[in-house]
Amino acid sequence: MRVSVIIPTHNEALAIGRVLADLPSELVTEVIVVDSNSSDGTPDVARRMGAQVILEPRRGYGRACLTGLANAEKPDVVVFLDGDYSDRPSELPILLAPILEGRADITLGSRLGGNNEPGALPWHQAFGNRLAAGLIGILYGVKLSDLGPFRASRAEVLRALDLEEETYGWAVEMILKGAIAGYRIAEVPVSYHPRIGKSKISGTVKGTLGAGWFILSRIVRYCFRNKKAETPRPA
């Protein structure tokens, strides 16, 4: 089974080497680092570690993920992972298990269900994730505790979902469209650690509010869009 790992980066030179070194080589077929205008040499470090590096000048977390997905070489499973070493790549077998065993189509690593170092997940980020996960449970019937970035999906599912979000809305689009289409979504506990370097999202008020808006608005938008599509037209 071919497993492609996609890692969006922006100024992660201090962390990307550790991320790539910890990926289980026996499970991973290819590693694609999608870099967005790093000024600290992140692409050079990634290349030295053997990763395929794609330069994506257009900003946006979702845009980086989509670019990586478009360049993956015939994968069976695609893994998305941040480049800050807050999630542990060595836990990839835990994330992949439900898919490889045929129990799930999409898996999410829950940072709230594993062993987390104190302060790794700021309180406002934990609250926002619980709020978003709660709304998804109410509106879509999928029970989750977290919307973490460490996730995996069967490649054919990603193709069928026709993902298009280019911003932080990417964090929920895969889940929402997957739930609407009836795909099996599973959650597994993963550990979480303080990131290396400053967060571009939770480390700033603007980033936190922006990510929260994109995530919550997409949850509501896709719900109403789905209900509208299900409403029969009058004869």
Image (spheres, rainbow, N blue to C red):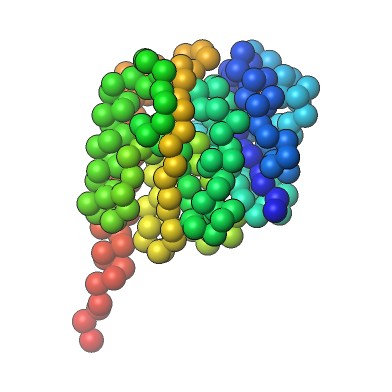
Residue 14 seen: yes
The residue closer to the viewer here, 150 or 13, is 150
Give the answer, above or below, for where 85 lies relative to 180: above
Whole-percent x, y for residue 171 in the image:
42, 40
**In terms of image quadrants, where is residue 215?**
top left
Whole-percent x, y for residue 176 in the image:
37, 52
How many marks are shown on the rendered structure? Answer: 0
Q: Position of 186 compared to 214: left or right?
A: right
Give the answer, above or below, for where 30 lies relative to 100: above
Q: Position of 99 compared to 130: left or right?
A: right
The residue closer to the viewer here, 169 or 132, is 132
Residue 167 seen: no
Q: Residue at x 31, y 28 (%)?
A: 126
Whole-percent x, y for residue 55 in the image:
67, 31
Give the answer, above or below, for where 155 lies relative to 227: above
Q: Residue at x 60, y 31 (%)?
A: 90
Q: Residue at x 22, y 51 (%)?
A: 138
